[in-house]
Amino acid sequence: MTDDPGHLEDLLRRGAPQVLGVLVRWHGRFDLCEDAVQEALLTAAARWPSGGVPDEPVAWLITVAGRKLTDLWRSEHARRQREQAVAAGDIAAQRHAPPADAGLLGTPTEALLDDTLELLLCAHPALSEPSQIALTLRAVGGLNTAEIARAFLVPEPTMAQRISRAKATITAEGATFTAPDHHQVERLAAALHVLYLIFNEGYTASAGQTLTRVDLTAEAIRLTRQLHRLLPDDGETAGLLALMLLTDARRDARTSPDGRLVPLAEQDRRRWHHDTVHEARHLLAHTLATAVLGPYQLQAAIAAVHAEAATDTDTDWRQIAILYRILERLLADNPMVTLNRAVAVGMANGPRAGLEVLDTVAADPRLRRHHRPDAVRAHLLEQLGDHTGAREHYRRAARATLNQPEKRYLEERAVRTTPSSAAATPPDRDVTQL
């Protein structure tokens, strides 16, 4: 029996992708498998609080989801038989037996491999890359449609349609799920993007009462480590792992004891995980020396510049601005990269220069629903001494974000933005959403 609803919720969230991975790997029907997993989770949520968590919860969920899948399969099969019978005028066809349970029950625990990774790397060629990523974020990351839509900077109905179409395509194609290799560059790129977006959502949650979702950042790092073991010579996989480690190393310093957001400039760097920083810098140095430079390696290099600075005033903002400029050239037409470059240029060359960079993407429709443009503009205006303008944009940013610690921080900045206030500090949001 468990008295901790939070622990139970976390257990179910972590187990769901593994269970879905097993069912999809064995049976292919993504839509039915996902429905079966949801039914199993509901059953667990109803039984486990009073009956206790099983010794092997994932195996329990696989067994129950397997039974649910069998029921769904029989129901669908019976429906199709009825439809065929009506169409053919053959009432006797309705008596056909449903397909047998394809060995779902009694699976030994030792046969349970890490199907999460295999599912993560599905990237079926029948799907567009955005659909591959969206579907896998739903299945592996456990993100809901609204969270995925924010990650892609698109309206929620658009993302809901994309996910529905992807499921329909998977069903129609009878897709199988296999891991990519060096000869499947596009599939690897999609897998890395998925991991990146899962980490991003965990690092600063798009909504909710807490700044971070440690379950997502930890899962993204775990899966990226596994992918790096599979492809140790791939520079971008190593770069992404280094980026995640360097960024996650700050996690304990990013909030105060009462849960308030602490911006990068004000963080106690003694609380950073310096062993993690050391691991990431070693990994980055190796990949920069041996692999072709890519976007994730560049972002990791930017994070490493922050990590090298003993204090905020020691940060080499000019170097960071140069690295962002190179990143912009690699990732043409990416407004989030430009937003981050605006902050770096503002710190290196003054707020007016930063505002000039910001103005180049101010009208980009992809940023219309995002709070970041107003937050960056408010920061730069405050540095410039335009306190009225800064206050207005802090308030706009606060209204736009659904993350409560971010909202509270921005509201407090708006209140504190007076001619006598201290110099502004940019929010700790260095990870760019590619």
Image: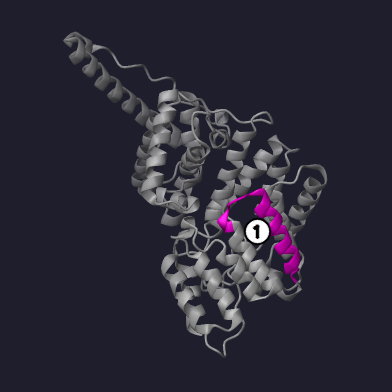
In the image: residue 160, left or right of residue 79: right
Does 342 sit above or below residue 177? Answer: below
Q: Was residue 323 drawn as part of the magenta stretch in this picture?
A: yes
Q: Which residues are magenta?
A: 315-336
Does 208 sit above or below residue 262? Answer: above
Q: Is residue 249 visible to us here?
A: yes
Residue drawn at point x = 76 percent, y = 73 percent: 314
Residue farthest to the right?
Answer: 289
x and y, in percent, of residue 125 in the image: 53, 29
Residue drawn at point x = 52 percent, y = 87 percent: 418
Residue drawn at point x = 30 percent, y = 20 percent: 77
x and y, in percent, of residue 359 in the image: 56, 66
Q: Was residue 300 drawn as part of the magenta stretch in this picture?
A: no
Secondary structure mostly taken by the magenta-highlighted segment of the chain: helix
Does 127 sit above or below residue 242? Answer: above
For the residue pair 374 and 230, the one nearer the viewer reads as 374
Hey, which quadrant is residue 103 in on the image? top left
In terms of secondary structure, where does tag 1 sit?
helix
Q: Which residue is mark 1?
A: 247
Q: Is residue 241 visible to us here?
A: no
Identify the amino acid type marked 1.
Thr
For the residue pair 298 and 330, the one nearer the viewer reads as 330
Q: Residues within 10 Å of mark 1 (few under 14, many from 20)?
A: many
